[in-house]
Image (cartoon, grey):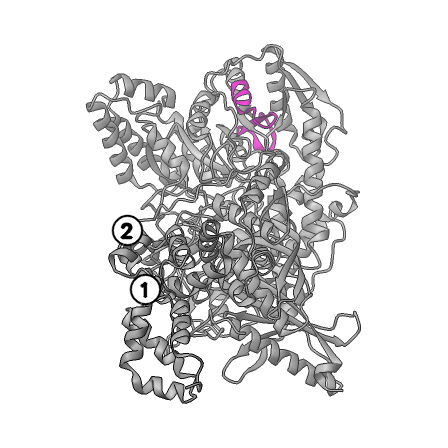
Amino acid sequence: MLSATAIAARVRSGEFDPQEVTEAAIRRLEARDPQVHAYLDPDLERARRCADAVAETLRRGEDPGRLAGVPVSLKDNMAVEGATLTAGSRILEGYRAPYTSHVAQRLLAEGAVLLGRTNLDEFAMGASTENSAYGPSRNPWDRDRVPGGSSGGSAAAVAAGIVPVALGSETGGSIRQPAALCGVTGFKPTYGAVSRHGLVAFGSSLDVIGPIACHAEDAALVHDVIAGHDPRDATTWTGERPSALTERADLEGLRIGIPEEFLDDAVDARVLERVSAAIAQLEEGGAITRVVPKGSLPSMHLAIPVYYLVACSEASSNLARFDGIRYGPAREEAAELHERYAATRAGLFGPEVRRRILLGTFSLSAGYADAWYKKALQVRRLILDEFRALFADYDLLAGPTSPFGAFKIGERSKDPYAMYLCDLLTAPACLAGLPSVSVPCGLARKGAYKGLPVGLSLTGPAGHDHKVLAAARAYEAVRGAPERSPLQEDEA
Amino acid sequence: MSGSGPTIDKELIERLAGLARLGLAEDERETLRDELESLLGHFQALQEVDTEGVEPLAHVLTATGEPGVDAVDPFEHARDRLVDAAAVHREGFFVVPRVVEGPEREATDDDAAPVDPDPADELD
Amino acid sequence: MTTATRWEPVIGLEVHVHLATSSKMFCRCEARFGAPPNTLVCPVCTSQPGTLPVLNAEALRRGVLAGLALGCTIDPHTKFDRKNYFYPDLPKGYQISQFDRPLCRDGRFRYRMPDGADREATIVRAHLEEDSGKIIHPEGMDLSLVDLNRAGTPLLEIVSGPDLHSPEEAMAYLQELRRTLRAVGAGDCDMEKGGFRCDANVSLRPAGTETLGTRTETKNLNSFKFVAGALQAEIERQGAVLDGGGEVVQQTMAYDPVSGRTRPLRGKEDAHDYRYFPEPDLPEFRVDPAWVETLRASLPELPHDRHARYTGELGLSAGDADALVAERELGDYFEAAVAITGRPKETANWLLTEVLRLVNERKIALGELALGPERLAELVQLVDAGGVSVQAGRRLATEMEVRPDATAAALAEELDLVQVSDDGALRALVDEVVGQETDVVERYRGGNAGLLNALLGSVMKASRGKADPKAARELLLETLGPAGDG
């Protein structure tokens, strides 16, 4: 499949007809989605209307924009006026968004074709899409395995070659981990770089939207389009924001640290092998890489508890609005108000969401808040400070994105904590709000994840989104084209 | 890795489920009790960190906010997109089961408050 | 010893004031009372998934103005928190409020008692928060209706210290507070529209001690009358409990104005667990101290200070000063007029009688009158100089309102209202009356001194109000001599 950059260039030059580009994407979706269940609502008609609008713009002799005719899929937690918006939950079944999210507006303004909404763990709570109320998505590399999550539908859609780029959202690893498990590039921007207006909230102080793409260049292009100040989100930053697409992609002299904490015992040996090979490639490309001895991130081992306490505390409040009164289905059999709340919420939230609401309610409740919520916030500061200190010596930090490759459906879903460990290496950057990219660095050669993709993570200081994406582009140049999933190979 | 966290009893689960308005069956409460206790056991390492004097970090944003202007910009689809989206609505209102005084009433409510027909009358 | 003398009430008030903004606190819906249900709503204030709050700058500004008027310190770094609880009028399931960094704190507020005595109450804090929607309970139906028009409108919650020791002090505090907030433009404090609502914390302690007893909170007092009634009722109730050897239970009360009693609204205080935490959708806001100083400099003279100046420096009666500071517009009108006339008492008198009469008759606002302060000053000066009589002045005021183009003097001339104080013309009028009303003159001379006024009235009438009453009276006396002399 062509890159988004290539499609946009050819649509703008008149070489490609946007309606034909869209029909081709629709054909790929119809052929492949039944095998991966990446989409909750393909919404083909909307895609066709978008393509018509781009064609009309071209007919008027105007430029449709930087994403002219590029099919882009959204994770189903981003609002598009009139379109379904389930967040993977029964509690939003049948709900249609009354307004359009900032990111969708930005994509449309640049001529993108919105092709469907993709599957996710309910309210983005999970690392496998198994928590989706509408059934799990499947990994295009092995359909018995998970695509990762929570943005697993978006990662699977890109890895299956249906669209060149899709949007995901990340709170603790939900863009980078599925990207790693599906062998594609996923970028989590600095917190506040992209407006959350129209993103169904999970953990508001952590949530951020970013691209999942086949090519780092496409991730950079889409990030350039969606990032920037939005007056409707008071937490977007207003400062200077250099282009990630035009930033010079050069590894020469780049100081890359590999904190030993990233090479935790929990990381699969075959995953480490691929990541070490990738680090060697970075070195060959001119980067100065160094393993930072244990002790530079002494609080990192606490990132899982800190992350779950913070995110679930915020989620317990964010999800209070789902009460069945103003929208969504209501359990009307309960005649008393508070019983109806309880019946609606218990009946329509899935088990993981209920678990996290309960954990968050606990963490904030009287008598426990100091020991848990406040304590988590204190350690969060320690983690941030430790990262900041490291960036005095390094331009980027590298390591594996996920401790392991794509696991089997059902393998981790019985034990909540086993699933939470998926975030081991991604949650720290989320807590510190740092930009981080996962790029595919080959397939595991042996072991439990043999033949499955491994992701290399590159993390930079806050606000250095352009530098992180430039490094990903530079790595891609030294690495060469990544392996394609079997579903994509069908294309050839 | 699992330390010994706090003991979560049935009453606490009931209290939390009540606060979060989650109507749980007996067996679900029991399962959640076990899970919460197990998770907090895994999280127990947090309690061993010395955080004396560390300012809690609720938000990584260092920049401060800019308030927006006070200008009315009405939403044109209040009826067709917001009211009509409700499972039950009536004459433009959202409908709920009859509200009775409950333990969770709030300072700004007024449903239980009598209305003085001439409230601005100042007494001497 | 009676209950009233044995126990001293300790009262603290929490007042919710609607801040006067065009749009809501966190979205751009119109903040207005009285619209059809759910017409002033948007995705944000109906808490659609994915929506975020954006702080209204004007709510912040008016909150600061109020805080300054209450003598508070303004926090240079204010922040918002979430207060979590479920209720149908609270669409997000949490209220955006301020917990540990209120915009305003540690104020001292002076208020005036009806007898003129000055008192001071501390202001513990004043913080910004959003209002809830409204719930309606239709008769005979097993359901309630929710209107979110009010949801998200800006409030300032003002919490006084436990410094009020009688219902009278509480009322005086509230009235001064309302006048002050209106004067600085923080809010309209329109009680009918719920723009000024009060919760009262009451406890009793043995008179002469400094301990604090167990308190109750009486909620939702939306008129001054209810506050007074509720405080009286609650003080009596607690007094009876304590007199009987019982203990006051900390609980939330409601006031029933029909029975004149307070009753518990709920008992389980421990059911509250609001799980406050910093609102992650709003960053910290820097409130620039230089900007705060600009606002401080822009504050008008506060009603309390104005009243003191009027009764002191200007020598007005307490009653007139009360009336003038009740509304900022009235005081400002007075200031403008008195600056020209230099006659405070006369100016206040004309303003509070004739000008307010015109406002009432015409049912318009003071600012809409054609008879503005400059023209009232003309009138006051004309009367003062003896150009027209007081009686004619009243008529002139009405005419000036209808004839905005004409000066007071020109109108008096035109309407033939110029006072007759010329000796010859006046003497002719007096002679005419004395000649005609022989019967009255006879009885006056017979000793009925009061009839001099009747004769004076006839002279005034004959002059069609133009005669200078003082000069006319003197002439009558000169002509007739003292009563009973005949």
Determine the residue positioned at 33% across, 35% down: A114
Location of the C terminus of chain A (image quadrant): top left
Q: Is residue A262 left or right of residue C87?
A: right
Q: Does the magenta stretch include residue C158?
A: no
- Check if mark 2's residue and mark 1's residue have beta carbons within 8 Å: no
Q: Is residue B106 visible?
A: no
Measuring from the top left, give residue B67's x and y in whole percent: 50, 41
* Front-most of residues A159 and B72: B72
Q: Is mark 1 on a helix, strand or loop?
A: helix
* Residue C8 position by quadrant: bottom right
Marks 2 and 1 sit apart, C-alpha to C-alpha, by 30 Å
Measuring from the top left, give residue A18's x and y in whole percent: 26, 26
* Front-most of residues A305 and B64: B64
Q: What's drawn in magenta, residue-wise?
A: A444-471
- Marked residue chain, label 2: C
Q: Which residue has dot 2 on it? A: C406
* Residue A412 position by quadrant: top right
Of mark 2 and mark 1, the one earlier in the sequence is 2
Q: Which amino acid does label 1 sit on?
A: Gly
Q: Which residue has dot 1 on it? A: C424
Which disc number belongs to residue C293? none
Q: Is residue A455 magenta?
A: yes
Measuring from the top left, give residue A411's x and y in whole percent: 57, 44
Q: Which amino acid does label 2 sit on?
A: Ala
Determine the residue positioned at 58% across, 52% down: C69
- Marked residue chain, label 1: C
Measuring from the top left, give residue B10's x and y in whole percent: 66, 66
Location of the N terminus of chain A (image quadrant): top left
Against C281, residue A105 (above or below) is above
Q: Is residue C311 visible?
A: yes
